[in-house]
Amino acid sequence: MDQGQPLALLLKQCPLLDEIALYDICATCGQGMELSHVDTKCKVSSFSGRHMLCDALRGSKVVIIVARNNCDTFEDNAPIITEITLQICNTCPSAFTIIATEPVESMVPIVSEIQRLRAKYNPRKLLGCVELNCVRANTVLADFLHVPPESVRVPVIGGATPQTMVPVLSAAVHPCTISQEQTECVTSCIMGGTEAVCEAKGSATATPCLAGAYSVARTTINVVKGLQGKKEVIQCAYVDSLGTCAPNCQFFASEVSMR
């Protein structure tokens, strides 16, 4: 299943959005028509093929890139990201760009460098989506504490992959006291989420499409709230740290204010 389809459905239900433009190199008119039948105010338009990319981006305030190939490798996805980013620079350079294409830790720097070379780079309008790590962390810790997941918020900092992300359980919104052994067990469950999904689906190349779409949708809605001037909107994201984090580490996942 493509992550873009459930993502579009989730965003169609958001009252903060006026219009969603779907784009893919493959046909999107069928999905666009079906989505337009959902009875919410958000309008839907669909664009297919590389020659329609400019039309899809025109007038956009927020651009979400969830493009991916059969294998989420740098070699496969970097050309896709490059093509879309170049068109963003030409068509909607002031748009807020959300990168949800793997590997996020590589795609975000590519986008930033292309924008920088085109003199269009604004570090406050570019982020990599790492909310899935937070969603998993919230769920795992809530299950451990036997509390509703909605009452838990665990910041996940560092990178975007299991090897580089760090769930900061001690800074969770729902305060708790757990032992070192319990912390290691909870952390292991959080970091092994994608592997567990692959095993459950019976495929080593499977992706968490549904939870992933939910995470990207939540990030997008928080971005829109920030653009609309809402206060106290906090989002974990992979962003340009602007020299505030570790030395020689330009990009870092951390909690940021969307205001």
Image (cartoon, grey):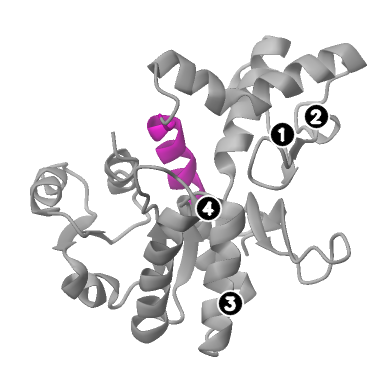
- Residue 9: where, in percent of width, then height? 27, 41
Residue type at tag 4: Asn
Q: Residue 222 carries which label?
A: 4
Drawn side of residue 149 relative to residue 66, left or right:
right
Task: Give the class, few, some or many, for how many residues have Cα within 10 Å of label 3's Cα (few <14, many ≥20).
Answer: few
Q: Which of marks 4 and 1 is nearer the N terminus?
A: 1
Does residue 228 appear in the picture of this structure? no
Q: In which quarter of the image is residue 47?
A: bottom left
- Residue 205: where, in percent of width, then height? 42, 31
Tag nearer the camera, 1 or 3: 3
Residue type at tag 3: Glu
In the picture of the structure, the residue carrying the numbered disc 3 is 113
Q: How far apart are marks 1 and 3 (CA)?
A: 30 Å
Does residue 76 appear in the picture of this structure? yes
Overall secondary structure of the magenta section: helix
Q: Is mark 1 on a helix, strand or loop?
A: loop
Residue type at tag 1: Val
- Residue 61: where, in percent of width, then height? 39, 71
Task: Give the class, few, some or many, for how many residues have Cα within 10 Å of label 2's Cα (few <14, many ≥20).
Answer: many
